[in-house]
Amino acid sequence: MNDLFARHRQVLPDWLALYYDEPLEITHGEGRHVWDADGNRYLDFFGGILTTMTAHALPEVTKAVSEQAGRIIHSSTLYLNRPMVELAERIAQLSGIPDARVFFTTSGTEANDTALLLATTYRRTNTVLAMRNSYHGRSFSAVGITGNKGWSPTSLSPLQTLYVHGGVRTRGPFAELNDRDFIAACVDDLRDLLGHTRPPAALIAEPIQGVGGFTSPPDGLYAAFRKVLQEQGILWIADEVQTGWGRTGEHFWGWQAHGQSGPPDILTFAKGIGNGSSIGGVVARSEIMNCLDSNSISTFGGTQITMAAGLANLSYLLDHDLQGNARRVGGLLIERLRAVAAQLPGVREVRGRGLMIGIELVRPGTDEADPKSASAVLEAAREGGLLIGKGGGHNTSALRIAPPLSLTVAEAEEGAAILEQALRSAY
C-alpha cells in the first residue's frame, strides 16, 4: 500500500484529496460492504461520495453492463441510441418538468456546466445567483458559482455570481429566527439583492447542500424564492446531483420539499443513477433545452454501456422501493445518532433526511468548528470497520453519512454502534 501511495503522489496532482493518514485502496465490494487490499472488510456509509446508490456489485446492473458490453459499448450521440432514448424517457417522466428534454453528460460537474450554458443563453446574461456554502463541481464555470471557499481554487470566472442567504438553517444572520421568519428574511434579502443588479439568468441551488455538510433550509424556501424569481423571468436550477433518486426518503427529488410553486425550470443529476457508472445529465423545459443556436454533441454522454447501467439501476430502485427504505431505515438511523449526540458535548447537530445525514462537530463549550476531531472520528470509524465522509463550509466541520439505499436495519444499527464509539473516542 505504501508503494501505491508513493506512486500516486509521484504522478497525480498534490490537490487530489485522499482520506485517511494511511490511504485506503478499495479492491471490491458487495451489497453495503467493501474490502481493501489487505483483506479488511468495511461497512460503507459513503458509497463513493453518494454514488454507489443501490448496492455494490448489484447483480442486475452487472448483468446489464456485461450484456451491453458484449454488443456495443459506445457510438457517440451522432447515432441513434436505444438505451439513451429509453433512459431519457423515464427520467423526463420522473422529473416533474413539463415537456421535458434530457441531455446526458459524464458527471455532475458537466451537468451543472451545461445547465449554466442553457440558462445564460436563454436569458442572455451571465449573472447567476447561487447559495452561500454551495458546491456545484470542479469545472471553471462550476467553481465560479461555488460558495464554499475550501473548494473554490480561483476567483476567476466566466460568470458574475451573487450569493444568497438560506442554504444553512442553523448558522448565519437569520439562524435565531423561526422557520417562517427565516424564510421571510431570506426572501427579503433576495428581493434587496435583485434591486442592486441586472436581472440574473438563474438561481442554482442544492436542496440539501452536499459538500457543505448536508445543510438545508426550511421546507418551502425555494418555493418562496421562485415566486420572486418568476416576477423577472429568472430560472430556477435544482442541483439534484446528491439529493436525487429518493435518497432523502420523503421525496424522489430534493426540490419536491419546495414544490409549492411548481418544479424547477432546469434539473441536474448524476452520481447515484449510474451506481458507479459515469452518468450525469440535465432536464429542462423544451424551449430552454432547445435555445442553443449551434450544433453540439457529447462523445461520452449517454454512451450505451452507461445507459444500460442506468436503466437497470433505476428499475431496481423503483421495483424495490428504495426511496421508502431510505425513509424508514434513515429515520431509525437519524434517531439513533441523535440519542448518541445528546450525550456528547462536541456534537452540535445531527441533521438530514433519509439516508443523507450530517453530524456537525464543534469544540466542546464553543460554537467553533472542530475539523481535527472530524478527521479523528473518520479515522476511528475506519478502524472500527466503517467508512464515512466529511464536509463543511464557513467555520463548520461535519461528518457525512450516505449509505447505499438498500441499507438494512441491522446494518444501520451496526454502523451507528461503530460511529458512536468513534465519536466517544474523540469527545
Image (spheres, grey):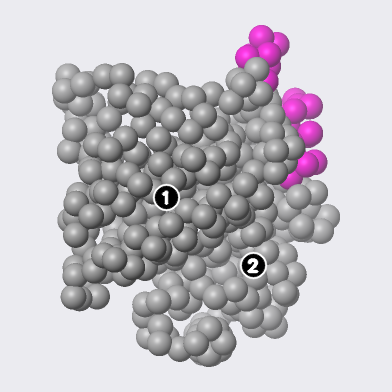
Mark 1, secondary structure of its residue:
strand
Residue 422 sits above or below residue 408 on the image: below
Image quarter (top left, top right, bottom left or bottom right) of the C terminus: bottom left
Q: Please, what is the three-letter code of the amino acid marked with disc 1?
A: Ile
Rendering coords of residue 54 (x, y %) = 58, 36
Image quarter (top left, top right, bottom left or bottom right) of the N terminus: top left
Using residue 246 as the reference point, say whether residue 100 is left or right of it.
right
Q: Which residue: 55% across, 50% down? A: 329
Which span of residues is magenta-colored?
64-91
- Of labels 1 and 2, the one closer to you: 1
Residue 201 shows in this picture: no
Res 116 quadrant in image: bottom right
Residue at image mark 2: 257
Res 143 quadrant in image: bottom left
- Using the image as rendered, state which of residue 313 and residue 283 is in the foreground: 313
The mark that comes first in sequence, 1 or 2, is: 2
**Disc assigned to residue 97:** none
Mark 2, secondary structure of its residue:
helix
Residue at image mark 1: 401
Using residue 343 as the reference point, say whether residue 128 is left or right of it.
right
User: Farthest residue in the top direction?
Assistant: 70
Rendering coords of residue 389 (x, y %) = 35, 47
